[in-house]
Amino acid sequence: MGREHLQHPDVNRSHEPVGITLNRRPGTFSPTGGEGRDEGVRVGTMNPILLVLVLVLDSSSWLRGRGRGGRRGGSWAGTRCGALALFLVLLLSSCSTSRPGTAGSRHFAFEQDTFAYPNELVWEYHFDERGKWVHKRREPNPDYTHHCFVVARAAKQFFQNARFDPAQPKADTKTYRRLIRKVVSTSPRNELPDAKKVVIPGYANLRELSQAQEKLLKANCGGAWRSYFQRGHWRMIWPFTRHHQQKTAEALAAEIRSNRAPVVHLVRFPSLSINHAVVLFDAAENEKEILFAAYDPNAPGKPATLTYDRSARVFSFPTNFYFPGGRVDVYEIYRSWCY
């Protein structure tokens, strides 16, 4: 596929937002949306590093305010806790500067490097006759939910660290199970050299493999807990400045030009109306915006479009069957040790 999918981005009135009532239709507001209620990661899931930081900051504040015998004043313990808190802040801040530097061996191809099956949703969403964004539980209950981060991560791992060889005969189930587990045990943060990539026999690409081996892939690519405990979730509670989003957009476009396929977290914290992961694989730039083509694990039928507005320095995601559309905050995950 070329870049024609970026020239006319689709806006489908059709992820799992929290039960937030929205009273206006798209285009008249800046909603928060994406993978939220019963999908992806909840606020209650706090990264251990972040939890330690919060506890240290809280304790250092208390200790600085009380000396021996309950008297007001500084204390050695408070100073030490404050220093530790500062160290953690600097440590976490340093994570934002670490990005892969090597170019990928080929460009991500949507028709080949994506899964044929979707991450399913617990809820159904739509605008009612009054223009409110409403939801109801999906019936019957889907059997593959809460896996958007798992699917996005696995797609990147197969893209970087597997090689398909359709000329070889198809293998048995035991062999494919072993090979799938070997691929998803590789680091999504670095690409293996060609000589060390996992060879998948009998299929031409991931799309073809996932059509034939759907159950096997779902059972072996990782459980839903990986979506809840993705190590980069600590970042979503920190402020997203316009400068940060500008630098993020520029870095993502540069990675795509280097044949990398960055996985990004779409979020609007503290709202949980979007909490979702997509894989970016193409970028069309002009003076006003950058149109990123995205593989959305919820909708594998065609690429989605993540738009970056250069003037406002804001990302937006279109209306679809799980998100009412609007601004999102974006950061890359699976790119360094703390993401």
Image (cartoon, grey):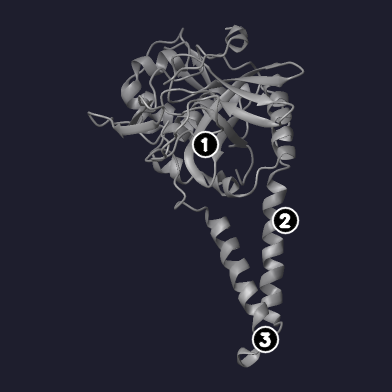
Q: Earlier in the sequence, mark 1 or mark 3?
A: 1
298 w.r.t. 276: above or below = above
Q: Which of the pair 28/196 is nearer the observer?
A: 28
Quarter of the image that includes the N terminus: top right
Q: Which residue is mark 3?
A: 72
Q: Which residue is mark 1?
A: 32
Q: Farthest residue in the bottom direction?
A: 69
Quarter of the image that includes the C terminus: top right
10 Å crowding of disc 1: few (<14), some (14-19), many (20+) = many
**Callout 3 amino acid:** Arg
Q: Is residue 320 left or right of residue 51?
A: left
Q: Give the CA distance from mark 2 to mark 1.
A: 29 Å
Q: Earlier in the sequence, mark 3 or mark 2?
A: 3
Q: Which residue is mark 2?
A: 90
SS label for mark 2:
helix
- Residue 91 sits in quarter: bottom right
256 w.r.t. 263: above or below = above
**Callout 1 amino acid:** Thr
SS label for mark 1:
loop
Q: Which of the pair 126/172 is nearer the observer?
A: 126
The x and y percentages for residue 285 are: 72, 17
10 Å crowding of disc 3: few (<14), some (14-19), many (20+) = few
**CB contact under 8 Å: marks 1 and 3:** no
